[in-house]
Amino acid sequence: MPERPVRKHLKRLPRITVEAQVYFITVCTIRRQQILVGRPLADVVTRALRHTAEMRGWHVGKYVLMPDHIHFFCAPGDAADLSRFVGGFKQESTRRSWEAGWQGRLWQREFFDHLLRDGESYEQNWWYVRNNPVRAGLCLRPEDWAWQGEMARL
């Protein structure tokens, strides 16, 4: 009978550090309607995003509101259920939009999420997102776009 190889056990790491997860989120309006830029819906959506983040234990970093979608970066704080957070944002912003006179659905059912992984830079991704209004011909320079900001440092 052949001898079994001797296996060495790997040593456990004394401490594991996991960097905070940062997600890149895109949520589109129903039928990609161009309704978000301008008042009152731009204000409604950004206030709802801030409120939902506070209530659901998430941190929202930089964001850009486009006419038919919103891009934002976020990280879990006390909570970690991304779907519940984004769903809560969509519900809150829809409710607030009805109060502002909007009728019907505001958002598509789905949303796009991307977890920034090792080697991916938040700032590089932000630069790309921040230039969306320029690429779309909505302004000449990213800093001219009024519907962007940062709610928390991630």
Image (cartoon, helix red, strand yellow):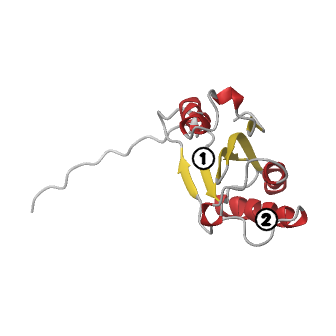
Q: Which residue is mark 2?
A: 94
The secondary element bearing badge 1 is classed as: strand
Q: Is residue 133 above or below residue 94?
A: above
Q: Position of residue 43 (x, y in %)?
A: 83, 48
Instruction: Name the residue at 78% across, 47% down.
Output: 38
Task: Classify 10 Å Cα crowding around label 2: few (below 14), some (14-19), many (20 and above).
Answer: many
The mark found on residue 23 in the picture is: 1
Q: Quadrant of residue 81?
A: bottom right
* Amino acid type indicated by mark 2: Thr
Q: Is residue 15 visible?
A: no
The secondary element bearing badge 2 is classed as: helix
Left or right of residue 83: residue 115: left
Left or right of residue 151: residue 21: left
Q: Position of residue 103 (x, y in %)?
A: 80, 71
Q: CA distance from mark 2 to mark 1?
A: 22 Å
* Amino acid type indicated by mark 1: Tyr
N-term mark: 2 or 1: 1
Is 99 or 50 nearer to us in this picture?
99
Q: Position of residue 135 (x, y in %)?
A: 54, 37
